[in-house]
Structure formats: C-alpha cells, structure tokens
Image (cartoon, helix red, strand yellow):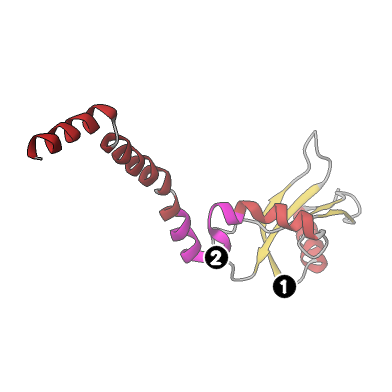
C-alpha cells in the first residue's frame, strides 16, 4: 500500500487549486483512501466540497465526487447541506438561517393571539357590551 503522504501528493495533483479538508484511510468496509476537498480560502464552516476515492496500491482515482465531475442534479443535492446550514452564503447566510429559525415561533404566537381574540365566548361578551351601550 502507498503511504499517506504519497496519497496526499496524488490527491493534490489530481485536484489542484483546492485544499484537502479530510483524509480517510482504507477501512474494512471501504478499501480506498477518501480525500475530501474544500476551496482554498473557503469559510471554515465549509468542511468539505467534494471528494475523490483513491486505490491504496496504485493511487488511481477510483471515484470522483467533486463539483466539476458531478451532474447538475448531483451538485444541487450536494449543496443542500450548505444551503440548509447557511454556509453557502457565508456569515450573511448563517444569520439568515438563524433568523428564519424564529419564524415558527412567531407564527405560533401570532396564531395563538388571533385565536384567543376570536374565541366564541369572547365574541358573546363583546356583543353583550355593545348591546348595553346602544
């Protein structure tokens, strides 16, 4: 088997311009090196954007799941995590996702207030008060 530093050099040569984010050695269930990448200078929240799997003996790329190698549909599905946690848009995206998390609470509170104002018992009391005045 090739040593880890040789696999790292092969991975960098296969995908120049990106940084290695994670490096996973072969296991009993996966007999390949998995090297995950992220763009150079990317936001630290972006842990990985694509991966390649390398043969541990020859160093050949067995499978490529980097953005340029994937179809548009696969790229869309892969981006869902980054859209979901807001990392796709940097700090502004994370703040937007954080603020959107309060939307269900705001909808619940406003719905409860509207429901309490329109309860039948309250409507009768309001109607009775208006009849006394008129």
Q: Please name whichever residue, 46 or 130, is drawn nearer the observer in this view of the structure.
A: 130
Residue at image location 42% in from the left, 43% down from the top: 104
User: Which of the 4 image quadrants contains residue 117?
Assistant: top left
Which span is picked out in magenta? 82-97
Q: Please name whichever residue, 5 or 121, is drawn nearer the observer in this view of the structure.
A: 121
Q: In the image, which disc is placed on residue 89? A: 2
Residue at image location 79% in from the left, 61% down from the top: 11
Q: Residue furthest left?
A: 133
Q: How far across and how far down the image is residue 44, in percent? A: 54, 61
Q: In the image, which disc is placed on residue 115? A: none
Q: Please name whichever residue, 106 or 91, is drawn nearer the observer in this view of the structure.
A: 106
Question: Which tag, 2 or 1, sits closer to the chain's start?
Answer: 1
Q: Which residue is mark 1?
A: 17
Quarter of the image with the C terminus is: top left
Asked whether, in this view, residue 118 is left or right of residue 84, the answer is left
Element class at badge 1: loop
């Amino acid at each position: 088997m090739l040593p880890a530093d040789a696999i790292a050099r092969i991975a960098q040569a296969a995908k120049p311009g990106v940084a290695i984010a994670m490096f996973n050695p072969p296991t009993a269930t996966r007999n390949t090196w998995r090297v995950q990448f992220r763009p150079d200078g990317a936001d630290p929240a972006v842990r990985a954007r694509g991966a390649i799997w390398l043969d541990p003996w020859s160093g050949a790329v067995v499978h490529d799941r980097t953005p340029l190698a994937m179809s548009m549909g696969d790229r869309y599905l892969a981006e869902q995590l980054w859209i979901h946690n807001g990392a796709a848009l940097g700090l502004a995206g994370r703040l937007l996702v954080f603020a959107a998390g309060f939307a269900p609470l705001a909808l619940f509170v406003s719905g409860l207030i509207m429901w309490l104002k329109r309860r039948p018992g309250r409507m009768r009391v309001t109607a009775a008060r208006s009849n006394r005045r008129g």
